[in-house]
Image: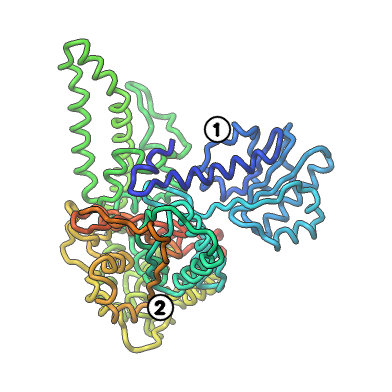
Amino acid sequence: MAAHLSYGRVNLNILREAARKELREFLDKCAGSKAIVWDEYLTGPFGLIAQYSLLKEHEVEKMFTLKSGRLPSADVKNIIFFVRPRLELMDIIAENVFSEDKLHSSRDFHILFVPRRSMLCEQRLKEQGVLGSFVNIDEYILDLIPYDGDLLSMEYESAFRECYLENDQTSLYHTAKGLMTLQALYGTIPQIYGKGDCARHVANMMLRMKREFAGTQNQILPVFDTLLLLDRNVDLLTPLATQLTYEGLIDEIYGINNGYVKLPPEKFAQKKQGEASKDLPTEPKKLQLNSAEELYAEIRDKNFNAVGAALSKKAKIISAAFEERHNAKTVGEIKQFVSQLPHMQAARSSLANHTSIAELIKDITTSEAFFDNLTVEQEFMTGVDTDKVNTYIEDSIAQKDPLIKILRLVCMQSVCNNGLKQKVFDYYKREILQTYGYEHILTLNNLEKGGLLKPQTSSRNNYPTIRKTLKLWMEDANEQNPNDISYVYSGYAPLSIRLTQVLARPGWRSIEEVLKMLPGPHFEERQQLPSGLHKKRQQGENRTTLVFFLGGVTYAEIAALRFLSQMEDSGMEYIIATTKLINGTTWIKSLMDRPESQTP
């Protein structure tokens, strides 16, 4: 089922299996038939660990979404609540339990907190008078979820907000715990590098946890050579820019959630000859996107301008393969052709899907609005007129374009100018509040607190120095056959990935000055390995680095790291981990107050 998780340099299926084993053990604790009541946010991440079939094997007969009022009827002995430790969810659970108690007295209730138990939540249940109704109160430690053969995510959407706005370090504790679980399965990581305050906290917590377990030596040969912890606020620019890889654009336009995307159905309707197409499907088309699909693995990280050529090449190969059937003369040849048929048909349907998706995206990327927006982004990145009011932003506000689009551009201008001049800052603020409503003053305040949109405090703008030293802008980026990571944004090389690249070779000492200009400390730690576990490296064997983004990572950055892994002379393979997979829109939304009252 999850074979694609074991294709890469590191077999991430081990992590998935460990998570499945724990889930089975918990389910077996609750003897008899079961109904699971899900906190809706958890269903996506859980789907990557266990399908319904696994739950069914352990007598799970019904599944409901957690909502207030009465639970739907179910003839089961156990009711298990799978929830995040949130107080507002405890009130709903209390309501559910009360309504059940009146009807069925013989039921057992259980709570499984994901990823940690919470004293506060238990206290709330006690105040509501239902704590005594629970037979089992347990925690299911689901920190890092394998998304693909080289990608892990905690799907902790509020991590950036908690760290930078609320000064809450819960997500950092979960990160440290997740990394300890990883080391228990894959061996101690000998070298830790980091940049940023959150990175420092996580490293300190990991080292402290290791000291606390000092008696137990980890006897597993290390799979990872290096861990690099990067704070999102070291590079605020990258997520604000529009991603230009195939996967990045799918996420920007339609949003990828837990490896699935929902697309407008009309492009995927199967029209039969002679039938009127009046009965078009209305349900969005849901597709799973990961490297288990051969074609997707091939094109996901390409710049979108190179996708068309790749698809037409694939179409030629597939139709040539189908033509082979005319050449099959002997029984043996026919048999061989038939045995390849399922694979070829899967490839053909995969090609049809991606051609449709590419057409949908092309309609948007060839529009004038997309081009104008991108032009402004690229002007900011190259330092053109970042210190004055931008006419395109002015016009967009006047036309009442979506607020998120405006905020992304204004934040980008601020980041590329090391803060906006007070006059420009006040002007934008006033225009936004007068056009979109004064309730957004809280959002602007959050963006300021998070460092995305701020007035200039020092007269020096360091961004041009950082851009030149780290070669963040490459003229004439080759989109078809890239030779540098800047192809993922058609010219802009993500700062976070440049730092990763320089760390591998020639090392951070060569960019000390730039590192000092970026927020937070940079550091290096070594973890002692038990004797006999030091790797003897074979000639030409690559090193493996786990890059952990604290506060979120975009698909374009992931594509850039995959590009570095595939480079002939890099000598390094990267596995990517993050608190959340983000894009500019979801990231800004997580920093908004009351984003649900947002105009779409």
Residue 592 is at least partly visible in this image? no
**Which element is circle 2 on?**
loop
Front residue of 170/439: it is: 170
* Above or below for 208 versus 559: below
- Identified by mark 1, the residue type is Ser
Residue 386's place in the image compared with 161, above or below, is: below
The colouring scheme, among rainbow, by chain, secondary structure or one colour, is rainbow
Which quarter of the picture shows residue 426? Answer: bottom left
Query: Mark on residue 521?
Result: 2
Q: Tell me where residue 51 appears, x and y as whole percent.
A: 52, 37
In this rendered view, identify the residue nearer to me: 235 or 520.
Answer: 520
Q: Position of residue 524 (x, y in %)?
A: 38, 72
Q: Residue furthest front?
A: 531
Pointer 2 or 1: first along the chain: 1
Residue ID at (16%, 12%): 329
Q: Is residue 142 something that shows in the picture?
A: yes
Badge 2 vs badge 1, beta-carbon distance below 8 Å: no
Front one among 122 and 386: 122
Q: Answer left or right for 422 relative to 569.
A: right
- The span from disc 2 to disc 1 (Cα, nearest Å) is 47 Å
Report helix, strand or loop for mark 1: helix
Q: Residue at 43%, 55% (x, y): give it.
A: 187
Q: Which residue is mark 1?
A: 53
| Residue 271 drawn above or below residue 186 | above
Task: Pick the quarter of the image with the N terminus.
Answer: top left
Q: Residues within 10 Å of mark 2 (few under 14, many from 20)?
A: some
Disc marking residue 458: none
Would residue 485 be found to the left or right of residue 187 on screen? Answer: left
**Residue 576: which quarter of the image?**
bottom left
